[in-house]
């Protein structure tokens, strides 16, 4: 707990995950999943006081066309 992605990748590679890039991808995927799950649960538990949501994208060179299109 309290570790950043770099620390977790280091621990995974020391436990036998053979490629650092694979470990980095795994950590990123799992972190995004946990974050999305917590966000969705928070929204569900507060649906009586929330009126909606607004999608906001970071507009930079890595932003996909879809994300640009939904940005307000």
Image (cartoon, rainbow, N blue to C red):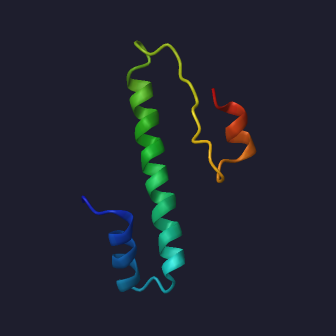
Q: Position of residue 60 (x, y in %)?
A: 62, 48
Q: How many marks?
A: 0
User: Where is residue 62 drawn, in percent x and y?
Assistant: 64, 53
Q: Quadrant of the N terminus?
A: bottom left
Q: Is residue 62 above or below residue 54?
A: below
Q: Position of residue 9 (x, y in %)?
A: 40, 73
Q: Which quarter of the image is occupied by the C terminus?
A: top right
Residue at (40%, 13%) from the top-left corner? 49
* Residue 13 picture location, percent across and down: 40, 82
Q: Is residue 30 above or below residue 52?
A: below
Q: Is 1 or 65 nearer to us in this picture?
A: 65
Q: Residue at x 44, y 16 (%)?
A: 50
Which residue in the rendered view is the most extreme toward the left?
1
- The one nearer the camera, 66 or 18, is 66
In the displayed structure, does residue 4 sit left or right of residue 68?
left
Q: Is residue 55 above or below residue 63?
A: above
Name which residue lies at 28% across and 63% down.
3
Rendered residue at 41%/13% (across/down):
48
- Residue 47, picture quadrant: top left
Snapshot quadrant of residue 5 = bottom left
- Outermost residue toward the front? 60
């Amino acid at each position: 707990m309290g570790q950043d992605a770099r620390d977790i990748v280091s621990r995974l590679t020391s436990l036998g995950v053979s490629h650092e890039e694979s470990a980095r991808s795994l950590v990123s995927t799992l972190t995004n999943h946990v974050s999305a799950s917590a966000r969705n649960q928070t929204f569900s538990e507060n649906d009586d006081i929330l009126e909606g949501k607004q999608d906001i994208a970071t507009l930079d060179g890595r932003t996909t066309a879809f994300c640009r299109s939904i940005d307000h």
